[in-house]
Image: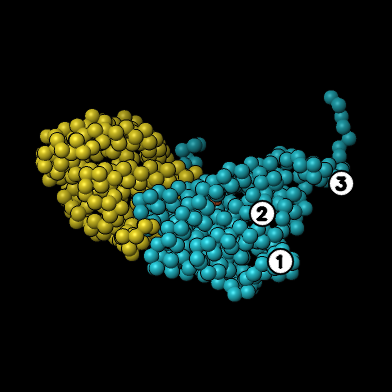
C-alpha cells in the first residue's frame, strides 16, 4: 500500500477551491470545508422546506379551481412542489449525515423557527387570480434564481435543480394560462388580476432578497458566490426578472403599481420603488401576514400524523 | 356516438345517465376529499403518491362528465360544479369529511379513516370497472380500459397502507378498527344503483349490484384472512346517495368546489 502524507488543512482547502474553480462537481462523500457544508445545508434545507411551505398557499385553491381542467392542472402543480421538497430534503439529509441529523430535525428546526422558509410564501392569497399569479410570476422568479444555480459546484444540488427547473417551466405556463384567461375575460376577471398584481408586486421584488448586506444586515449571497453555488447577485437576478416580465405584464394591459418604474437607458437597468425592507425583515422572522398560520398548519398536521410515522417505523422493524 | 344514441330507447338512456352520474359524482367527491389532504399527508413521499391518485380520480370524473355532456345533458363543468346536493348521485361514503375541521384552517384529519375509505372505495371501483369492460355501452367500455391501468396502482397503494397499519402499533390498530366501523356504516349505498337498479341491470350496462358486491368481498378476503379480521357486513343504507339522499357534508363540499366557478358560469376560466 502506498502511504501518502496526509494533506494539511490548507492544502485540502486549496485543492477544493481548485476543483470548484475548474468546474469540477463536489459529491456528498467528498471532503469539503465546514463553511461550504454549512452554507449548503442552510441553502438547500431552506429551499426544500420552502417548496413544501409553498404548496400551502396554492393548495388552498385546488378544490376551488374553477373548472375540471384547472382542478387537474393545479393539483399536478402542487404535487410537483411537494416532489421538489422531497428531492431537496434528501440532498440536505445527505449533507447533514456527519452531524447525525435527519429530516425530522429539519422539520423541528422549521417548527422552532430556526429554519426559515422563503419570504414569498408568507403572503396571503385572496382570489383565484392569486393562484394564477403565483404560478406565473412566483414560479417565473423561481426559474430565474434556480437556473442561476444549475451549474452549482455541489453536484447533487445541481442535479436536483435540473429536474426542478424543467418542471418549473410547466408551472409558469400553467400560471400564465390562468392569467391570460382572466386578462382576456370579463371586467371582473380583469380587475381580479390587477388586484392580485397590486398586492403581490412588492413581494415579487422582495423575492430575490435585499440588494446588499447593508439593507438588512445579513445576506448569504457572498458565500454562495465564492463557492460557485450561484453566479449572480440578488440585484442582478431581480433585474433579469424585470427584463423578462415587465413587457409581458404590460402586454396584458395590466398596470404595474409603481409610478417611478422606468428603464435607465444609460445605466441599462430598471429603476423601481424599493419595497419596504423593514417589512421584509419582519416577514423572514415569521412575522408576515400568514407566517404563523402556515407554520401552525404544518406543525399541527405533523403532530396529528405522528402516530402514522410511528406505526410505519414499527412495521419496518 | 349519435348512431348509438338513436338506437337507444328512452328507458335505456335514462338508465345509462343514472349510472354515469353515479360513477362521475363518486370520483369527483372522492378526489375532492383526497385533495383536502394535499400538503398535509403523514410524510412527503405519501403526499406525492396519494396526490397522483387524487389527480387520476379527478381525471376519471372528468371523463364521465364529458360523456354526459356528449349525451346532451349540458356542459361537463356545469354538471360537476352546479348541481345541488339533492341531484347528486354519489355514495354517502365519498362525501364524508376526512375528519374534524375545514381544510382552509388547521384540520385534524384522520389518516386511518382515509386509508380504510380509500381501500374500500378503490377496490369497489375496481369491481365496477372490471364489469364495465363488458358493458353494453361502448364509451363506458373505453373508459373502463383507461381507468383500469391506473386503478391497479390505486388499489395496491391503499391495500398496502391498510395491511401495514393493521399490523403495527396498538394505537394504529385501534384507530384502524374505529375507522373500519365508520366506513362500513356508510357503505349501504356504495353498491346500490338506486331507483334505476332494474333498468341498469336489464340493459347490461354493468353487472348486478349483488355480483359487484360479491366480487368486492372476494377481493378483500385474502387481506382480511391474513389480518385475521371478519369480512365487513354491508348494512342497509340509512341514506341512499344514488337517489339524491345525502348528508350536509355534501353541500358544504359542493359550495367549496364551485365557489369560484359560480362567480360567472358563462365566462372562460
Ligand atoms: Fe418548485
Ligand atoms: Fe413551481
Q: Looking at the image, how many numbered discs can be counted on the residues?
A: 3
Q: Which element type, helix, strand or loop, lies under badge 1?
A: loop
Label 2 or label 3, whichever comes before in sequence order: 3
Residue beneath the point at 67% across and 49% down: A149
Q: Which element type, helix, strand or loop, lies under badge 3?
A: helix
Q: Is residue A180 above or below residue B47?
A: below
Q: Which residue is mark 1?
A: A265
Where does residue A273 sit, x and y in percent of width and height? 63, 72
Q: Quadrant of the N terminus of chain A?
A: top right
Q: Is residue A290 above or below residue A34?
A: below
Please identify the quarter of the rendering in which residue B188 is found: top left
Where does residue A205 sit, x and y in percent of width and height? 61, 65
- The answer to whether residue B156 is left or right of residue B89 is right
Q: How is the image coloured?
A: by chain
Q: Which element type, helix, strand or loop, lies under badge 2?
A: helix
Real-space Cα separation, disc 2 to disc 1, in angstroms: 38 Å
- Front-most of residues B81 and A310: B81
Where does residue B262 sit, x and y in percent of width and height? 31, 62
Q: Which residue is mark 2?
A: A42
Chain B: what color?
yellow
Please identify the quarter of the rendering in which residue B172 is found: top left
Does the beta carbon at disc 2 come under 8 Å from ligand 1?
A: no
- The answer to whether residue B17 is left or right of residue A200 is left
Residue beneath the point at 29% across and 50% down: B76
- Look at the image and tell me whether residue A47 can be seen: no
Q: Which mark is residue A10?
A: 3
Q: Identify the chain of the residue marked 2, using the numbered disc in the image.
A: A
Look at the numbered discs 2 and 1 and tell me whether their residues touch, using CB distance below 8 Å. no
The chain letter corresponding to cyan is A
Please identify the quarter of the rendering in which residue B22 is found: top left
Amino acid at each position: 500500500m502506498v502511504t501518502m502524507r496526509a494533506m494539511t488543512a490548507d492544502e485540502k482547502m486549496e485543492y477544493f477551491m481548485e476543483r470548484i474553480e475548474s468546474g469540477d462537481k463536489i459529491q456528498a462523500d467528498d471532503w469539503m470545508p465546514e463553511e461550504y457544508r454549512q452554507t449548503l445545508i442552510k441553502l438547500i434545507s431552506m429551499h426544500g422546506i420552502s417548496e413544501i411551505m409553498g404548496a400551502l398557499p396554492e393548495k388552498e385553491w385546488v378544490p376551488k379551481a374553477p373548472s375540471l381542467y384547472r382542478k387537474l392542472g393545479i393539483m399536478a402543480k402542487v404535487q410537483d412542489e411537494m416532489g421538489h421538497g422531497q428531492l431537496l430534503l434528501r440532498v440536505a439529509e445527505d449533507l447533514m449525515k456527519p452531524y447525525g441529523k435527519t429530516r425530522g430535525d429539519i422539520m423541528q428546526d422549521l417548527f422552532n423557527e430556526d429554519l426559515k422558509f422563503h419570504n414569498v410564501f408568507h403572503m396571503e392569497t385572496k382570489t383565484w387570480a392569486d393562484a394564477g399569479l403565483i404560478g406565473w410570476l412566483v414560479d417565473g422568479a423561481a426559474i430565474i434564481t434556480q437556473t442561476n444555480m444549475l451549474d452549482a459546484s455541489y453536484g447533487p444540488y445541481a442535479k436536483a435543480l435540473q429536474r426542478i427547473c424543467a418542471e418549473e417551466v410547466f408551472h409558469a405556463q400553467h400560471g400564465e394560462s390562468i392569467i391570460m384567461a382572466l386578462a382576456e375575460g370579463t371586467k371582473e376577471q380583469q380587475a381580479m388580476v390587477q388586484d392580485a398584481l397590486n398586492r403581490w408586486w412588492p413581494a415579487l421584488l422582495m423575492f430575490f432578497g435585499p440588494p446588499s448586506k447593508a439593507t438588512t444586515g445579513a445576506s448569504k449571497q457572498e458565500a454562495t458566490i465564492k463557492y460557485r453555488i450561484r453566479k449572480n447577485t440578488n440585484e442582478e437576478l431581480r433585474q433579469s426578472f424585470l427584463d423578462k416580465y415587465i413587457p409581458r405584464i404590460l402586454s396584458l394591459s395590466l398596470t404595474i403599481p409603481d409610478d417611478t418604474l422606468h428603464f435607465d437607458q444609460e445605466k441599462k437597468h430598471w429603476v423601481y420603488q424599493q419595497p419596504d425592507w423593514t417589512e421584509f425583515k419582519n416577514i423572514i422572522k415569521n412575522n408576515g401576514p400568514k407566517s404563523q398560520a402556515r407554520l401552525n398548519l404544518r406543525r399541527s398536521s405533523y403532530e396529528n400524523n405522528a402516530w402514522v410515522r410511528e406505526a410505519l417505523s414499527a412495521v419496518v422493524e | 356516438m349519435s348512431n348509438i344514441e338513436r338506437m337507444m330507447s328512452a328507458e335505456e338512456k335514462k338508465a345509462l345517465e343514472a349510472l354515469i352520474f353515479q360513477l362521475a359524482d363518486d370520483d369527483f367527491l372522492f378526489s375532492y376529499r383526497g385533495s383536502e389532504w394535499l400538503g398535509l399527508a403523514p410524510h412527503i413521499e405519501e403526499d406525492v403518491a396519494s396526490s397522483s391518485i387524487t389527480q387520476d380520480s379527478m381525471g376519471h370524473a372528468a371523463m364521465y362528465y364529458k360523456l354526459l355532456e356528449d349525451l346532451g345533458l349540458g356542459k361537463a363543468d356545469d354538471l360537476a360544479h352546479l348541481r345541488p346536493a339533492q341531484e347528486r348521485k354519489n355514495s354517502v361514503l365519498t362525501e364524508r369529511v376526512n375528519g374534524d375541521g375545514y381544510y382552509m384552517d388547521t384540520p385534524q384529519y384522520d389518516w386511518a379513516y382515509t386509508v380504510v375509505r380509500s381501500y374500500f372505495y378503490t377496490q369497489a371501483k375496481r369491481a365496477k370497472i372490471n364489469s364495465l369492460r363488458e358493458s353494453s355501452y361502448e364509451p363506458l367500455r373505453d373508459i373502463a380500459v383507461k381507468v383500469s391501468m391506473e386503478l391497479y396502482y390505486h388499489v395496491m397503494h391503499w391495500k398496502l397502507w391498510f395491511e401495514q397499519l393493521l399490523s403495527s402499533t396498538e394505537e394504529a390498530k385501534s384507530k384502524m378498527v374505529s375507522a373500519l366501523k365508520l366506513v362500513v356504516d356508510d357503505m349501504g349505498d356504495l353498491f346500490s344503483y338506486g331507483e334505476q337498479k332494474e333498468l341498469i341491470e336489464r340493459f347490461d350496462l354493468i353487472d348486478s349490484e349483488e355480483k359487484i358486491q360479491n366480487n368486492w368481498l372476494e377481493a378483500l378476503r385474502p387481506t382480511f384472512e391474513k389480518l385475521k379480521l371478519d369480512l365487513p357486513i354491508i348494512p342497509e343504507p340509512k341514506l341512499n346517495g344514488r337517489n339524491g339522499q345525502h348528508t350536509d357534508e355534501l353541500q358544504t363540499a359542493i359550495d367549496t368546489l364551485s365557489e369560484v366557478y359560480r362567480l360567472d358560469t358563462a365566462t372562460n376560466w
